[in-house]
């Protein structure tokens, strides 16, 4: 049997979560909150689960009332009102959205430009379409794109450029200048853009999230993805959405209908009840910044070297001073087994296993969890 992805093992998030469970370690590896969604959302789900008629297939592109709510929120935040009928598709998490975009637009031999480190599904999804990932490195400590290198990597075969801000795993955030520069690079090309914005509500230190949705020139060629899992602390619900102009949305839906057809009906109804209330979104930057600050404060005396984190769920840290010369996978395995804290080795986000002795901590955890983890990490030096 010839595998289509012979070099791909089990996702690092599953591996580290399993290892954490096996060793009763605190799981700061996989990116998910250890607190629950807002009570009104849980109550809404309970209501809709008990509502006769809400248990069958939803419309293929998503419930109209949820798409309407997404449209209104997008208008409020980014000054652009996507048409719910032709520009919004509800997906089974951003994961399915990402995969469906790749399947819809990447043809055999097409190049897809990825900035590395990159979220683990991007490259396999490209390769499964016969596409060729082209990697442009982001450099520590701030992991900002070097647009000259991006320009040099673009070619007439570049079908798609993928950006992710706030960035997983580094917490880097794209600026308005970054998006203007990218718009200039893509002008007069047929290259499409995929913007993974699942952490759009988690931008710190007074900075703004610069959504591609707010840039008319870019959004005319873009798929913009978001995830209710991140925004509502409900990663297990697997509901996200994709915004794209009508021609691109039509292509996306051609594929989405055959990957999953439609997304779970009661969860969509529950989200449609709460999405119109924008109050939550305003609290999220401070909520997550407080967690980032607490984790940084707790890690400061442990010997980890903290890199900047401007947004998202994650803090990257160097462990070179704690374990000179050790590779990051061995370090994370030992940290899980011996210290009882699971984190993710950054080499898992590189196609060639690039290892700079960095690990990723998830701070989407309660204060209690973060303090308990830090207590286990003191005395490492
Ligand atoms: N993109 C990025 C950058 C992510 O971090 C994640 C989830 N961790 C996803 C996509 C997938 O989102 P979802 O859980 O909605 O499928
Ligand atoms: N996106 C999450 C992370 O980066 C994990 C999602 C998953 O387990 N597939 O940790």
Image: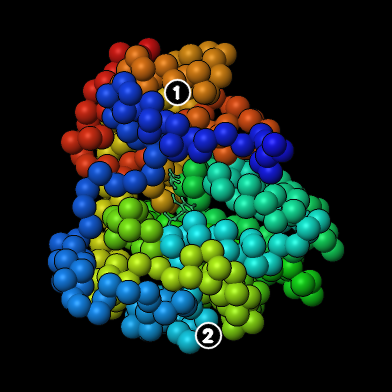
Q: Residue furthest right?
A: 156
In the rendered view, does 295 fall on the left or right side of 94?
left
Q: In the figure, 368 relative to 118: above or below?
A: above
Q: Label 2 vs label 1: CA separation? A: 45 Å
Q: In the figure, 108 relative to 115: above or below?
A: below
In the rendered view, does 51 fall on the left or right side of 135?
left
**In terms of sequence position, does the residue under pointer 2 or pointer 1 come before the other?**
2
Tell me where residue 160 appears, x and y as whole percent.
70, 62
Q: Is residue 355 visible?
A: yes
Q: Residue at x 37, y 74 (%)?
A: 57
Q: Which is in the foreground here, disc 2 or disc 1?
A: 2
What number is the disc on residue 256?
Answer: none
Q: Residue at x 48, y 70 (%)?
A: 261
In the rendered view, does 272 fall on the left or right side of 30?
left
Q: Within 10 angstroms of label 1, few (less than 14), some, or many (20 or more) residues? A: many
Q: Residue at x 60, y 65 (%)?
A: 101
Q: Quadrant of residue 248?
A: bottom right
Q: Nearer the viewer, residue 211 or 232?
A: 232
Tell me where residue 269 appears, x and y as whole percent.
28, 75
Which residue position holds label 2?
86
Q: Image quadrant of ligand 2?
A: top left
Which residue position holds label 1?
332
Tally of numbered discs: 2
Query: Dot 1: what SS?
Result: helix
Q: Is residue 303 visible?
A: no
């Amino acid at each position: 049997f010839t595998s289509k992805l012979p070099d791909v093992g089990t996702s690092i998030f599953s591996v580290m979560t399993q290892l954490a469970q096996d060793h009763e370690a605190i799981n700061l590896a996989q990116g998910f909150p250890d607190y629950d969604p807002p009570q009104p959302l849980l109550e809404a789900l309970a209501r809709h689960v008990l509502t006769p008629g809400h248990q069958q297939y939803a419309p293929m592109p998503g419930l109209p009332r949820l798409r309407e709510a997404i449209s209104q929120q997008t208008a409020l935040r980014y000054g652009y009102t996507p048409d719910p009928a032709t520009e919004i598709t509800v997906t089974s998490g951003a994961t399915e959205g990402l995969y469906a975009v790749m399947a819809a637009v990447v043809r055999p031999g097409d190049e897809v430009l990825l900035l590395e480190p990159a979220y683990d599904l991007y490259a396999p999804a490209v390769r499964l379409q016969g596409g060729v990932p082209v990697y442009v490195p982001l450099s520590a400590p701030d992991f900002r794109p070097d647009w000259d290198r991006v320009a040099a990597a673009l070619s007439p075969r570049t079908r798609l450029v993928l950006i992710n801000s706030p960035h997983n795993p580094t917490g880097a955030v794209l600026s308005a200048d970054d998006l203007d520069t990218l718009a200039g690079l893509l002008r007069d090309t047929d290259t499409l853009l995929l913007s993974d914005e699942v952490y759009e509500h988690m931008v710190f230190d007074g900075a703004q999230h610069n959504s591609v949705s707010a840039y008319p020139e870019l959004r005319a060629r873009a798929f913009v993805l978001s995830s209710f899992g991140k925004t509502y602390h409900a990663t297990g619900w697997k509901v996200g959405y994709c915004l794209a102009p009508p021609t691109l949305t039509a292509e996306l839906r051609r594929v989405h209908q055959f990957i999953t057809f439609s997304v779970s009906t009661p969860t969509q109804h529950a989200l449609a009840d709460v999405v119109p209330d924008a109050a939550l979104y305003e609290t999220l930057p401070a909520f997550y910044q407080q967690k980032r600050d607490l984790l940084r404060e707790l890690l400061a005396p442990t010997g980890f070297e903290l890199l900047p984190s401007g947004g998202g769920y994650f803090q990257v840290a160097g462990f070179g001073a704690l374990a000179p010369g050790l590779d990051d996978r061995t370090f994370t395995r030992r940290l899980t087994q011996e210290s009882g804290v699971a984190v993710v080795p950054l080499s898992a986000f590189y196609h060639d296993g690039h290892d700079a002795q960095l690990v990723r901590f998830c701070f989407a955890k309660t204060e209690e969890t973060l303090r308990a983890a830090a207590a286990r990490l003191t005395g490492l030096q």
